[in-house]
DNA sequence: ATTTGGATCGGT
DNA sequence: CCGATCCAAATT
């Protein structure tokens, strides 16, 4: 009998039920798949950011703010938190940590694998390319509509780069935490303007 | 009931 | 830097 090639596997719930920075690092290189009315869209995660409410003032759950929008962040890990930003962009997060601990990981950039029309340059375009919107808020990422898996054959090793998070200057000292993680070798990592880069203190 | 401003993006 | 575009949250 031929040796079985390793097949794709969905990480167990315990993978997600950890502190957000650990999950943010280890999501790099895993694949995101969306079965959208018969079309299977697949992309590799190459950039993430960790949000650690309630302490983290950059998180929507800062101060334990529990609202209609943030409710899913307080729920079980491995579910999707999708919200609309600036009236036109959807952002996808992976809920992490224990129930009641509102951590999440923002998926900031993806590398197309299958049925993804174009390169993606940031969290808003990533969801657009994957046809992900608020209708998927709260969905289980271990289900069969939108999920995360370790690709067949295993994810190749990732050289992880890190920087401060983008667009959270309002968060004071929390904005300086280096909780943005990316694949140093991927050309799909979101480009950041010089001005933003300087504001966020990101090395060129 | 009304106001505010945002975990973005692309064009100037 | 600026405008697009709209909703949830905060404020009155």
Image: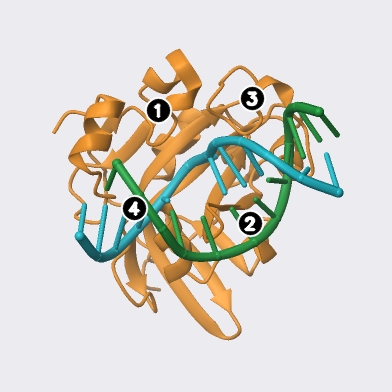
Chain colours: A orange, B cyan, C green
Distance (Cα) linking label 2 and label 3: 26 Å
Looking at the rendered structure, the secondary structure element under dot 1 is loop
x%, y% of residue A131?
52, 71
Q: Earlier in the sequence, mark 1 or mark 2?
A: 2
Task: Kindly identify the residue that appears in the image at 44 percent across and 31 percent down.
Answer: A168
Q: Earlier in the sequence, mark 1 or mark 4?
A: 4
In this rendering, is residue A112 above or below A177? below
The residue that disc 1 covers is A179
Task: Kindly identify the residue that appears in the image at 52 percent across and 52 percent down.
Answer: A86
The residue that disc 2 covers is A142
Q: Please, which chain is the residue tagged with disc 4 on?
A: A
Labels 1 & 4 near each other (Cβ < 8 A): no
Distance (Cα) linking label 1 and label 2: 24 Å
Same chain letter for marks 1 and 4: yes
Q: Nearer the viewer, mark 1 or mark 3?
A: 3
Q: Residues within 10 Å of mark 1 (few under 14, many from 20)?
A: many
Q: Residue A155 — which label? A: 4
The residue that disc 3 covers is A62
Q: Residues within 10 Å of mark 4 (few under 14, many from 20)?
A: some
User: Is residue A177 found left or right of B3 in the rendered image?
Assistant: left
Q: Please, which chain is the residue tagged with disc 1 on?
A: A
Q: Earlier in the sequence, mark 2 or mark 3?
A: 3
């Amino acid at each position: 009998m031929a040796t079985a090639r390793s097949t794709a596997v969905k990480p167990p719930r315990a993978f997600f039920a950890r502190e957000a920075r650990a999950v943010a690092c280890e999501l790099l290189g895993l694949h995101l798949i969306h079965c959208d009315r018969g079309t299977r869209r697949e992309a590799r995660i190459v950039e993430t950011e960790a949000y650690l409410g309630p302490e983290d003032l950059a998180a929507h759950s800062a101060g334990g703010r529990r609202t209609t929008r943030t409710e899913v962040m307080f729920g079980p890990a491995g579910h999707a938190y999708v919200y609309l930003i600036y009236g036109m962009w959807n952002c996808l997060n992976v809920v992490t940590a224990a129930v009641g601990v509102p951590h999440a990981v923002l998926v900031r950039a993806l590398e197309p694998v299958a049925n993804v029309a174009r390169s993606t340059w940031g969290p808003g375009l990533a969801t657009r390319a994957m046809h992900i919107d608020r209708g998927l808020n709260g969905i289980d990422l271990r289900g069969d509509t939108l999920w995360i898996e370790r690709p067949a054959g295993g994810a190749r090793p990732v050289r992880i780069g890190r920087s401060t998070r983008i667009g959270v200057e309002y968060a004071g000292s929390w904005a300086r935490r280096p909780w943005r993680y990316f694949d140093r070798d991927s050309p799909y990592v979101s480009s950041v303007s010089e001005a933003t880069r300087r504001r966020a203190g990101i090395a060129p």
